[in-house]
Amino acid sequence: MAILYVEENQMWVLRTRRSDYAFGVDSFGRLQHLHWGGKQGNISDFPHPDDLQKWVWEAQEGNSREEIMPWGGYAFTEPGLKMTFADGVRDLKLQYIQYEVEGDDKLILTLKDAREPLIVKLVYRVLEEYDLIERHVDIYNDGDKPVSLESVMGAVWHFPIHPDYRLSYLAGHWGAETQLLREPVLQGKKVLESRRGQTSHQCNPWFAIDFGEAVEESGEVYYGGVSFSGHWKITVERTPYQTLQINAGLNDFDFTWQLDPGEVFTSPICVGGYSNAGFGDASWNLHAYQKSELLQKSNELRPVLYNSWEATMFDVNEKSQMQLAEKAAAIGVELFVIDDGWFGQRNDDKVGLGDWYVNPVKFPDGLRPLIDRVQSLGMKFGIWVEPEMVNADSDLYRRHPEWIYHFPGRPFTEMRNQRVLNVAREDVQNYIFTFMDRLLTENDISFVKWDMNRNFTEPGWPERPHDKQKEIWVRHVQGLYSILRRLREKHPGVSFESCSGGGGRIDMGIMPYVEQFWTSDNTDPFDRLAIQEGYSYAYNTKAMMAWVTDVPNYVNGRTTTLRYRFHSAMMGSLGIGVDLNAFSTTELEEASAYIKQYKTIRETIQDGRLFRLMSPRSKLGTAVQYVNESRSQSALFVFLHAQRFRHPFMPVRLRGLDPEALYYSAELNEERSGRSLMTIGVRPDLKADYDSQLIVWNKKE
Ligand code: DGJ
């Protein structure tokens, strides 16, 4: 049973396969956290809700570790909920009223302020199979005056008291997204957040806590994320008393939400998990959860796509795209995507965003001839859009200058010559839905790459009262989700990719509306190893797009072999972004052979279990292995970064195989038992700088 209620103690235990999460009502009526971690045998093993750790010179109330942590009374850690009532009172005391269980996995606890008719529901969903808990809060204003919400967290996570907390998180910048960072958590706060309007390249809404000793396959790891695509915040706070609290939810910076009488406000969903089997297991639980609960069409294999962005930039036209399409089909591409430049007067990034009609010079007869050609070649057709943006030099902006976020009469910060449409507005949402609906109705489009290339600045909405303008951070994201939801309902056959100047919008909030993510604009295959490693801690492999592009790579100027580029990109959902017109016959043949090989292992890669055997952060090299569910196939990718001192590459011990089975590798022309591969390992044959090898093992019948 996933949810256990113990009436005599007024406590609840949320049980997953390998964890218990418990809380109960204390004598102040508060919901006290009691335990998160390994499973307990008996109810008497849990502490009593009144049995709080005592600290010197703190009132009993100050020791509270509540499931919600409302700001009021003696609460000095980060609040889970902070608000102001209509009469100016800024104190909140939430007391337990009742609980209900929905289905066999959802627990809803109703709390009420000690004085005001303000109701807060804590909603838990237990994902037993994945050792995960989803949590969010619903706030109801049952009074007759508005209240002002100033800080709303979806979850407040408490951890066992331990001397050595260590935080893992994903940070970086454009072209260097999702880099894994690790540091000890000492007294004070560490804030992970986005204030940029979208999820951000700089920090990703995921965290993991361990006790300084967890590795890939062992150790206790707590982890989680915020399912929201902008203005999120995760605060990691170690108190003077060595307790650790993580608040996850909306960013309280520049945020207030006026909750009118009768209204309800829902926080983003936050996910939290516990593993006693290391970081690898933690990642795998998230991957499996995302596949089964969040991602669209996750039972289908992602097609090999071609995208000409790096090859042609804005210079797209019917003739050049048709030539590329013919070559793409010949090497085995299944989805042909035209990127930026097909619409309005879009000849560079200074003009045209917002004008979503087909450019008549580049495509004199519309998109139909190109789509027909692509389809006659056996491929599906996809298209790029950036619906939330506008160039000042566009018909849309000339018609509706008031549709962007701005403060009237103040200078405006430009970025990539574009401005952000106020998607919090319903008329803007309708405009976007209407042109997207028309585009998808008039053309046989199977795939949309939905881009978003700048951060919000001057986030004003002059038509709204001042006290309601700070809602834009949340309303924009809600507006975006609503447009995507409507589009998906009307065009169920279309797949979507979330892109934001690379990996600026990768998160679990947008997952239910998309099939995949553009991981990074940095397509350098060596840098990608680190970006992809970080990504893999939090997100599903199938959703991770990786392209093979031209050399020297435009980001780093690095030249690598086609083999190395393919191997790096084959570790996710494969895309091709090279200028196929400039490829020699030999290169086309080589590319075609890799795509053919990828198709024989893509199910294992996209749906299999991932093992991070050697980190790109190490000086030695990188090794990543994928194993399919039945353990009949394994694909091992190894990369040597730089040859030094003539050292041979270390043997790599595989994981997840059937020890009793025999496996055969065509690359090595070798037969080995699973046991031998997992205990003795394989010796990759790598030489010189940026060398790579893919070794596939198939179980012998
Ligand atoms: C940023 C994306 O990440 C690129 O892949 C490309 O689509 C450009 N935008 C187009 O402007």
Image: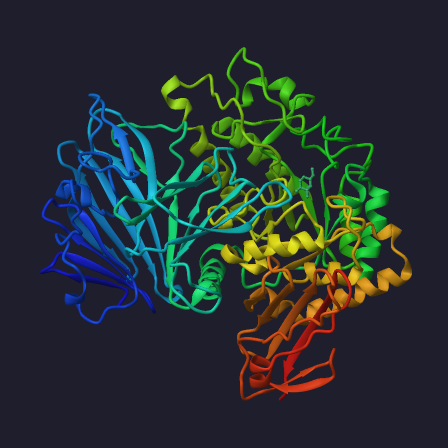
Q: Residue at x 70, y 50 (%)?
A: 523
Horizontal side of residue 10 vs 587, given as left or right: left
Which one is nearer the viewer's eye here, 591 or 38?
A: 38
Q: Residue at x 25, y 32 (%)?
A: 262
Q: Residue 457's spot in the image, x, y percent?
A: 54, 25
Which one is nearer the viewer's eye here, 651 or 525?
A: 651
Horizontal side of residue 272 vs 407, given as left or right: left
Which one is nearer the viewer's eye here, 356 or 101?
A: 101
Q: Would you identify the image quadrant in which residue 274 lies?
A: bottom left
Q: Would you identify the image quadrant in which residue 143 lies?
A: top left
Spot the residue most to the front.
645
Question: Does the image show residue 332?
Answer: no
Name the quadrant of the N terminus: bottom left
Q: Residue 504's spot in the image, x, y percent?
A: 57, 42
Q: Residue at x 47, y 58 (%)?
A: 290
The quadrant of the rendered image in which ligand 1 is seen is top right
Horizontal side of residue 315 vs 37, given as left or right: right
